Amino acid sequence: MNVRGGALASIVIAAFVLIIVAAGAGALAAPIPASGSSNLDPPAQDQPAPPHKHRHFPTPAPTPMALPPEVKAKVPAYKPGPIPFHDGEQLIYQASWIGIPAAQARIEFHKRPKDPSRWIGEIWIETNPFADLFYKMRDYMRESMADDTLHTSGVHLVQHEKSRLNYYDVTIDRPAQMVTITKKNHKGTQNREFIASDPWGPISGAMIALTQNFEPGKTYAFDVFSGSQRYVFAFEVEKRERIHLSIGDFDAWRIVPDVWYVSDGALRSQAHGTVLWISADERHLPLRIEAQAFIGYVRADLIKIDGKDGVENALK
């Protein structure tokens, strides 16, 4: 769910909704230093500075920040097809690292009780006791979307990882083509602004992607705003193949994600080695994600689909 905590975290928001699960286990993919290891290099202050070395301060990013024209030109506008989820539906995913269970995510979709013209998407992600030893995560995301267009008015995200507790609110004003990201924690409040003609949140971006007609060889690209960054994600449909999950066998589309752009410019290469499988039927359910890690791989599988009762109990 977050894009900060591990070797795979930069693409966590990317993979429709399923990839969100991979972040919890992705944190385990980073190398863990041995407690007794020693640094063989001399301290930095003992090494002479290279001659004629001048200090250059970074140039501040413009505010509000727009996409580079060459990136914007490759991102089309999309219209939604049939919604792949039912009112009151829950999807449960389990993430594992080299076969060891590490995290679980629960994704819920339901109509707003007092306004059925709005979809509400919610995600909870929680690492298990084993993963807590390395990287404890208790994250939550909520997004409201229009029933007809899937356009979102904003995203609320709680990032509780290790000792960090951050609150993010993404406000999306489509008529003004303006997106504002607000971060709050014990240090105060920070704001960032972006210019965007077709912005999506993580959940609304996932839903609009899943409503498209998948075809082998075709690439889809979306401008997505998470709690901390702006991403342009691309998804190439490679082929159709059959996969096995604990809940059954599925015909699936094999999809390879890529990151064309990220606002901080530092995380693009981490999308390589990641594959998604989406059910090759009218529902386009996210079934599995698998990604290379520092050691082995991270995998997240759909393990359960629940109905409305589970949503009502969760909202009490």
Image: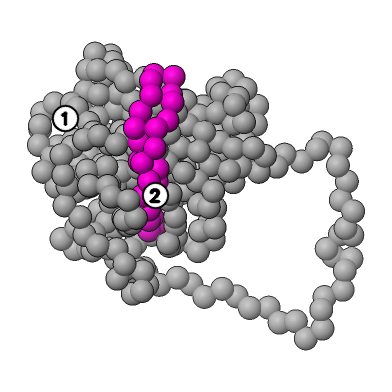
Which badge, 2 or 1, comes first in the chain's sequence?
1
Identify which residue is drawn at 86% across, 51% down: 39
Residue 230 on the magenta span: no
Q: Give amino acid for label 2.
A: Glu
- The quadrant of the picture occupied by the N terminus is top left
- Nearest the eye: 103 or 137: 103
Q: Position of residue 160 (x, y in %)?
A: 49, 34
Q: Which mark is residue 315?
A: none
Taking 132 as reference, is 160 left or right? left
Which residue bears the numbered disc 2?
A: 238
Give the quarter of the image for residue 179. Answer: bottom left
Magenta-drawn segment: 231-255
Identify which residue is drawn at 22% across, 17% down: 308
Identify which residue is drawn at 34% across, 32% down: 251
Q: Is residue 9 above or below residue 195?
A: above
Give the quarter of the image for residue 161. Answer: top right
- Nearest the eye: 306 or 139: 306
User: How is the protein colored in the picture?
Assistant: one colour
Q: Secondary structure at mark 1?
A: strand
Which residue bears the numbered disc 1?
A: 111
- The quadrant of the picture occupied by the C terminus is top left
Q: Position of residue 35 (x, y in %)?
A: 82, 36
Mark 2 vs mark 1, foreground winner is: 2
Taking 143 as reference, is 299 left or right? right
Q: Position of residue 261 (x, y in %)?
A: 43, 62
